[in-house]
Amino acid sequence: MQCDALFTADPLMVDLASAPVFLDDSSHSFLKYITIGAGYAAALVILLIFISPAVSLFVVICVLAMEVAVAKPAEFSALTGRASGKTDASGYHHPTSGQMVRPPATSDTPQSPCDNLVVRETSSEPGDSQARQQQLMQQQLVPRGTLSLPPKGSDFDDPVEVVSPAAPTLPPQRIPAAPKEVEARKRAFRARDLDESELDDQLTCHAASEPATSGSSGSKAVVHLDMDAVSRIMSETRQVANLLMAAMADELEDTPEIDDQDETPLEEPESPEQAEPQQQEVSVPSSQIEAAPAGNVDGLPARFRSFLQALIAKSEWDNGEMTALARQHGVMLSGAIEVINEWSCEQYGEWLVEEGDTYCVRTDLLEGTVECPLAHANVPPF
Amino acid sequence: MPISARERAAILKSLAAGVVPSIGLHWIQVGRFDEVAALIHDLDLVQQGGASVRFVIGRYGSGKTFFLNLIRTVAQKRKFVVAQADITTERRLQGSSGQAKALYCELMRNLSTQAKPDGGALQNVIERWVGDVDHDVRSNGGNEEVVKRKFATELRPLQDLVSGYDFVTVITRYYEGYLNHDERLQDNAVRWLRGEYTARTDARQDLGVRTIIDDTSYYDYLKLFARFVRIAGYAGLLVNIDELVVLSHRLPNTTARNRNYEAILRIINDCLQGRTEGLCFLFAGTDECLEDRRLGLYSYEALATRLAPNRFATEERQDLQSPVIRLQNLTPEDCFVLLSNIRHVHASGNPAQYIVPDEAIVEYLKECNEWMGSQCFQTVRRTAQGFVHFLNMLEQDSTRDWRSMLMRNASAIRQTLELPDAPDVNADDELSEFRL
C-alpha cells in the first residue's frame, strides 16, 4: 500500500489511528449502482405492465429523486462531476474553474493519504498557513505512535513500519532530533510551502524543553537495579545451571547404550596394538570416573580403537585418505567419526575430529595440552 | 567449573556478531527455571517413547531463538537427534509447490547430534546404525546377506508406518553402496532420505523404490525418522521450528495459511494423543502470531481451543503443562545477570580473572540505556554485543581502565548500539511510502 506523498503525518511517527483506512470502496459503489439499476429496471417493467405509462413515469421520477436525496454529499458531488464529464478517481474538476475539487472528508468516508496533497493544491491562502503549520508541528513533535525499527535480520526490514498504538511501544522517551529527522521535517515544510524559520524556532524550543535524561544533554540516564531482584535472578540462574548440568549428565546414566556389546573387551583382537589397551587399567580420579560412561572408563567401543589409533598419527587428513583409512579398519567413516566425537565430547568436552574440507584431528586433546576435566588424567593408550 | 576454550570462543564470537551461539548456551542462560524444567521434562518423556509439542511464545527480543538453541544443546547432550529450521514463505508446513518438502529438506540438512552439532549429521546417524548392525552380524559369523536381512528385521516396526518398506530398501541400498565402493549409490540414498528427489522415476531407477518424499508425505517421514533414530540408539528426534510468525503474518493467502494451520493441528493431535513416539516439536513465534484472531493460530478454531490459555493461570504463574510456554522480556536485572554471565564466560569461568567489576556492568547498562532507551533491555542482542566488544577491548589493552574505556569509547559504543538506519532511500523519496 503506497502513497506518492505523505505530508500530513510525521515521517517517523505514524500511527494507525490517523492512518487512512483503505476499503475497496470502488467495488462497493459498483455493486450499489448495479443493485439500484436492477431495482429500477424491475420496477419499470412491473409498472409498465400493470399501470398506465404516465403513472409509471411519475413513480420512476419519484424513486430517482429519493435516491439522490439520500445520497451522501461526496457521492452527490461526484455524480455532479460525472455529469460534467470531468471526474477522476479522487475527485472532479470544477466545470467552470477547472480546479480539482475534493469531496469533504467525513469520519465515515474512506480517505486517501493523498487528500492533503490535493488540499495544498487548491487552498493556498496565506491565512491557512499558521493553522497548517501548527498542525504539522503538533504532528511532528508529539509522538502519536512509535516508530519500531526491528533489528537487522528480523522479518520486518521495511524502511518504516507503522505500529498500531496497541502494539508494544517504548515508554515515552524524548530523543533529540537527529540530523536526518530535522532534514526530513524541513523537506516536509518546504513541500507544504511553510516557513522553515518557524520550524527552526520550534525545534529550538523543543530542544530546550527536553528532559534532563536526554542523550544529548550529556547527563546520565537513570538505571534502577533492584538488587534484591538481581539476587533472586542469580539464585534462579544457578538453579537453572544446575538443572541443565544435571539434564546434560543424565544421559550418561539413562540412555540405553548403543554399543553395549562393545563395553566388554574385544573378543577377537585383530592386532597386538588393539589388545594392549584392554589389558591396561586407566587411572582416573574417582570424581571423573563418575562422569564417564558407566561400565567402561574410556567408553569408546572397541571396534573403533584401531581406527582412532591410526587417526591420531597426524593432525590433518584429506577426504580420500580418511575414507581409505576407515575401510582399512573396517568401519564406515561418518559413523566412526560420530562415535569417536561423541566419546571425545564426554571424555574431554571437545570434538576430536573436526570435519571440513579436510579432517582435522585434535591430537592436543589426547596429549593433555588442553584444559579439560580429564586432560591431566592418564589418557588411554592405543 | 571451567569453560572449555571451544565453548568460550563460540559464545563470545557469536555474541560479538549479534547471533545466538549454537553451543555453550547454558553458561549464559538467565533465569527461566520453570520453562527450562518443563522442556527438560518433555525431553524425558520423549526419551521414554512419548511425544511432545510446545509453542514458545514471546515478543521480539524475548529470547525465543536462544531458548530453542538452549533446548537443542540439552537435547544433543542427551543423545537426541535435532532437526532445526526457520519457516519462510518458501519453506513451510504445507504447500503445493514444494514448500513443505523444502522445509523437510532444510530440517534434514540441519540434522545435528552431539558429535556433529552444526548440522549435516544424517549420514553419521545412518552409518552409525548400519555399521553397528554390520559389526553385530559379522561378529557372529554372518555375511552381507545376513546383514541385509537383519536390516529388515530391525526396522520391522517402521514397516507399519507410511513408506516404511521404501525406507528399509533405501538403507539397504546405502549399505550396498558401501560394500561395492559405490559412492554414487550412497549419495543417491542420502539424497532420497533428504527429500531431494523430485521425480519418482529417478528414484526407481537409482534406488528401486516407488515413492519419494514430497509435500504431502514429509510429515510421515519425520515420524518414520523419529522411530528410526530410536532404533539406531538415539533418544529421539527433536524438531525445532522457528519464525512461526511467517505463517501468520507473511502468508497473504488465507487458504494457504489455514492449510498450514491444519498441518500444525495434525502435529498437535499426533503428539498429544500419543499417535507418534520419540518425537518432540518445538515451535517459536510471537504473541501476535498466536493470539491474532484474524491471522494468528487463534484464527483457526481447532487450534484456538487446543492452545487456549488455562483460565486459572496468571501472568506470574503460567501453566507449564500447557502446550504454550510464554517468555517474558528481560528486565534490567535480567540484563545485569546476563552481562555478569558473559563476563564469567569471558574469564573462562574463573572469577579471579574477571576483567571488570560489577560496577562496570551497571555503568555499561547506564550507557546503553542512555542511547538505546528501553530497547537496551527489551532487545538484548545489541546490549550483549556491545558488552563483548567492551570486554574484548579491555582485554587487548590492559593499560586502560574500564572507566576511561567507557568514557573514551562512548562514541564507538554508541555506533554499535545505535538503531540501524533505515535502508538507503532516495532523499526525495524518504517520505514517499509507508507500509501498513
Image: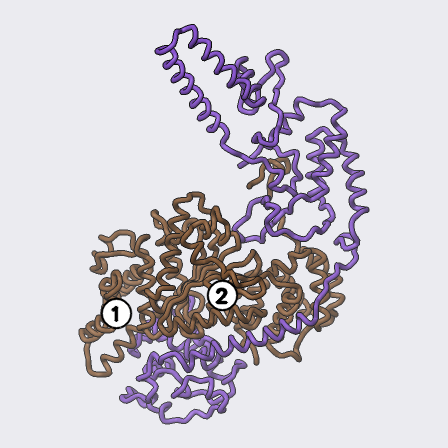
Chain colours: A purple, B brown
- Mark on residue B157? 1
Q: Is residue B156 left or right of residue A352?
A: left
Residue B327 drawn above or below residue A120: below
Residue B185 drawn above or below residue A251: above
The kind of residue on which mark 2 rests is: Asn
Q: Chain of mark 2?
A: B
Total residue callouts: 2
Choose between A331 and B403: the one closer to the eye: B403
Tell me the quarter of the picture where residue A329 sits.
Answer: bottom left
Q: Say if residue A321 shows up in the picture.
A: no
Q: Residue placed at 45% from the left, 79% from the top?
A: A250
The kind of residue on which mark 1 rests is: Pro
Q: Is residue B272 left or right of residue B10?
A: left
Residue A95 drawn above or below residue A319: above
Tell us which disc is closer to us: 1 or 2: 1
Q: Residue placed at 47% from the left, 47% from the top?
A: B295
Residue of label 2: B69
Expressed as whole percent of the image width and height from the top left, the position of residue B281 reads 41, 63
Expressed as whole percent of the image width and height from the top left, the position of residue B127 reads 31, 71
Q: Is residue B172 left or right of residue B333?
A: left
Choose between B359 and B390: the one closer to the eye: B359
- Secondary-structure class at tag 2: helix
Q: Say if residue A88 shows up in the picture.
A: yes
Q: Residue placed at 30% from the left, 88% from the top?
A: A266
